[in-house]
Image: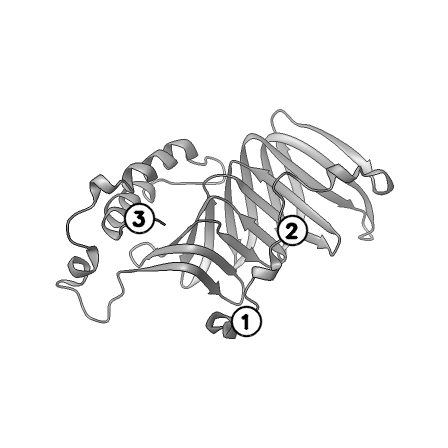
Amino acid sequence: INDSLQPDSLKQKAIGNLNKRDITASGVADSAKMDAVMQRSLSPKSLPPDTLPTKAMKGSKADTMRYFLAFHHVRIFNDSLQSVCDSLFFSGQDSVFRLFQQPVVWSGDSQVTGDTIFLYTQNKKPVRLYVFDSGMVVNQSHKEFYNQVAGKTINGYFKNGTIDYARVRGQKAESIYYVQDRDSAYVGMNNSTGDVIDMFFLKGELNKVKFVNQVHGIMYPMKQIPPDKVYLKNFKWLDKRRPKNKLELFE
């Protein structure tokens, strides 16, 4: 968030325009249009001379939380989900956390990164997330093996606070997936691309990957995986930044 990310424009336009869209697994809203809406809503021209806190609290109960802003080194900890980012905006009207500037979200053994992430909650639990650009999901299958899926946008859903399903779209979504047999032994690594990649999780672990339209890929036996094919472009495992407990939030 920079000086143009003021609460009034975020409240009146970002919430009013973006959150009325219904983003579903079968029909993700066009991210380019959404990004354009965000740029217009965060334009300095839309800023009023006064700041929103005075207006938001006027006529409201003192103990009612309307929204809050957090800047620089933001960390979130929950038993089922953790997150870090540089800046955050949360609205009590829709219970959506808007994470800006290098946001990272962890759930179980999975890590989600992107340019901007919206995290939707209900009853204080995550129910959905949307990554606007440069999205990547990394799932640690083994301490040396990382399943990876990258694309322009990610639309993910949670079940009982744990990630359950994610759809990755855009301009050749790419995947690295380590295949296991029924005895959980690793038999090879699949490197594939497609217009859409669906990821299905079981108890927080990646269980199945499905490719849709324009699918191309190759399966490498474990002993024949090329060293330059182990990681997707811009791969980063950021577990060191992950809050491990509530006490870390105060360090």
Q: Which residue is mark 2?
A: 139
Which amino acid, mark 1?
Asn
Q: Which residue is mark 1?
A: 245
Left or right placement of residue 192 versus residue 164 in this view: right
Q: Any mark on residue 5, and which?
A: 3
Left or right placement of residue 222 versus residue 195 in this view: right
Which amino acid, mark 2?
Asn
- Describe the element under mark 1 as helix, strand or loop: loop
- Describe the element under mark 2 as helix, strand or loop: strand
Q: Nearer the viewer, residue 37 or 198?
A: 37
Using a 10 Å C-alpha cutoff, classify the residue at mark 2 as few (fewer than 14 neighbours), some (14 to 19) or many (20 or more). many
On the image, the x and y values in percent for residue 143 come to: 74, 56
Q: Quadrant of residue 123?
A: bottom left
Q: Earlier in the sequence, mark 1 or mark 2?
A: 2
Is 208 drawn above or below residue 30 in the view shown?
Answer: below
In space, the residues marked 2 and 3 are separated at their CA atoms by 32 Å
